[in-house]
Amino acid sequence: MLQPKTFKSALAKLKQPLDAKTLRAFTVKATKLKKPLEDVLIAENALDETELYQRAAEILDIPFIGLKGREIKQDIINLIPGPVAGTHQVVAFEKEKDAIKLAMADPTDIQTIEFLRRKTGLEPKVYMTAPSDLREALRSYHTELEEHLRIIQEGAEGVAGGDLKKVAAELPVINIVNSILEHAVYENASDIHIEPLEKEVLVRYRIDGILKLAMTLPKTIQNGAVARIKILANLKLDEHMAPQDGRFKIQVQDDKLAFRVSIIPVYDGEKIVMRLLHEGAKPLTLEQLGFLEKPKEIVKEAIKKPHGMILVTGPTGSGKTTTLYSVLGILNQPGVNISTVEDPIEYRISGVNQSQVNPKANFTFATGLRALLRQDPNIIMVGEIRDQETAEIAINAAMTGHLVLATLHTNDAPTALPRLTDMGVPPFLVAFTANIIIAQRLVRKICQFCKKEFKLDKTATAELAKAFDANRFEKLLTQHTETKKLKNDGSFYQGAGCHRCGQTGYKGRQGIYEVLEITPEISALINAHGTADDIKKTARVQGMLTMMEDGLIKAKLGVTTISEILRVTKE
């Protein structure tokens, strides 16, 4: 689909431009059908699709290529993975010595072009083509996949356990598993789910925290795919009734990726979940994580302290470990010794001594933490405080001159303090050692390519008022550097949906935070066995932003949407 500005200019350049009345009528129809105007005009034969895209190519100063009836060699087509080509509407149609010619419906998609430059090692030469031409060219991928599946179907029926190694080594099986992995990498999926059903196998990706169906494969692929992944992860091929965990690595051009594999028996076979870990990824900065100016300064001041505890709280999958890695990235200097005990080690950080929990060898968080204290550390990171023993050792370490970073499972920042005392840690120790508590969630970011402004209607405004004090929001806007010039006029942003975001309106994620600084007043409350509500009220008076407030400021700034904030903060 063309960008709105290009589409409008191309319409005006047609040999027979549409008159204003006709255009208005089709605009109304497109709105009713909830479809792009471009798609409705083409479907109704109100204009010639090829001519529209030729005019768009002229405006963008990009050559146009017609693919209908053009024979493209299979080895050229295969330079781009099928799922990538389908999702991002791009086809390779010719190869030169150091260049590859790409046909795209949207040649302004720089992200895809850059990926293909790295993927192929060739210089992309971009051409514009019509969507119908692309669809015809993309059929060759389906033909190839069907051929892989046909070969598997013929060879996999009635496969016995002893033949699994042979099946896993078949080229069609290898190609399909590679395709699943490669597509997941390109889509920035965090997890791959391969789920056997009675008559088929589902492949789903978790993208920006939401599971989405990627492909449906025939049942006959199941044995080969599972065996292939077991071989990659060095797991037992003949074990089908017990859970197995493993890990393997691949390299996609310059990116090194690790896949953490978990396999469990389910009713219709074995389900596989693979977590993608970018091993070469650098820690994000506090700005990239999404901290607003005031909370960011509090975090920076807290990590300058030579000792004490920095706790990050939130449910599983809320990005706690990423935040801790970012703090470690700031602290990682030649003059300090940083040691961690994690379960699992998600990212490798150069210059940091990282240890993996291993319960079978009696290497738990508690025993690992004790061992680290004998390693002359300055800074210690504990993957998670799960019990009284780990909590006591961590707090004692913070008291004896170490900076301790750890995660805890609580819903918000104030609740973390009573949680530690509930574990049996004396309140005065918690009050004395804690520097800051950061609670967080991850929200989906609005796709910047289809972002548009809108105003809340009366019903939505009333619903928002139930969840949040409108007067306080007005004050918050004037108190923060990022929002001082913004008006509380009910205007927010949302994504319309485009091919770059998979029609979801969202692309990428960012954190919303609640940063609780342990001030003398908060310390006094902890010592007095104050409740989480008492701590929260005092912290808010002192200027703490709740996660809801932090999120609403980011919604106002156009980073995310109100519906997304309400989705992740509801309890």
Image (spheres, rainbow, N blue to C red):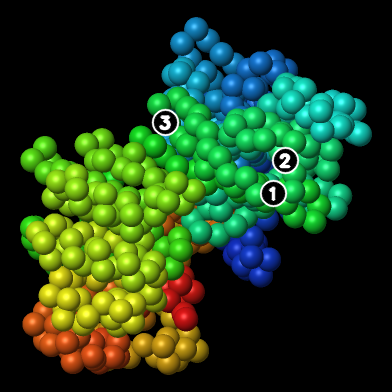
Give amino acid for label 2.
Glu
Which residue has dot 2 on it?
A: 239
- The reply to whether discs 3 and 1 touch (Cβ–Cβ < 8 Å) is no
- Using a 10 Å C-alpha cutoff, classify the residue at mark 2 as few (fewer than 14 neighbours), some (14 to 19) or many (20 or more): few
Residue 561 picture quarter: bottom left
Which of the two residues, 36 or 421, is positioned nearer the viewer here?
A: 421
> Label 3, label 1: how many angstroms apart (C-alpha)?
33 Å
Image x and y of residue 186, in percent:
51, 38
Which residue has dot 3 on it?
A: 255
Q: Residue at x 35, y 35 (%)?
A: 280
Above or below, comparing residue 199 to residue 567 in the picture: above
**Does 561 sit left or right of 178 as displayed?**
left
Image x and y of residue 524, in percent:
13, 87
**Does 487 sit left or right of 143 as displayed?**
left
Residue 545 seen in render: no
> Label 1, label 2: how many angstroms apart (C-alpha)?
7 Å
Q: Which labelled disc corresponds to residue 242? A: 1
Where disc 1 sits, the SS reads: loop
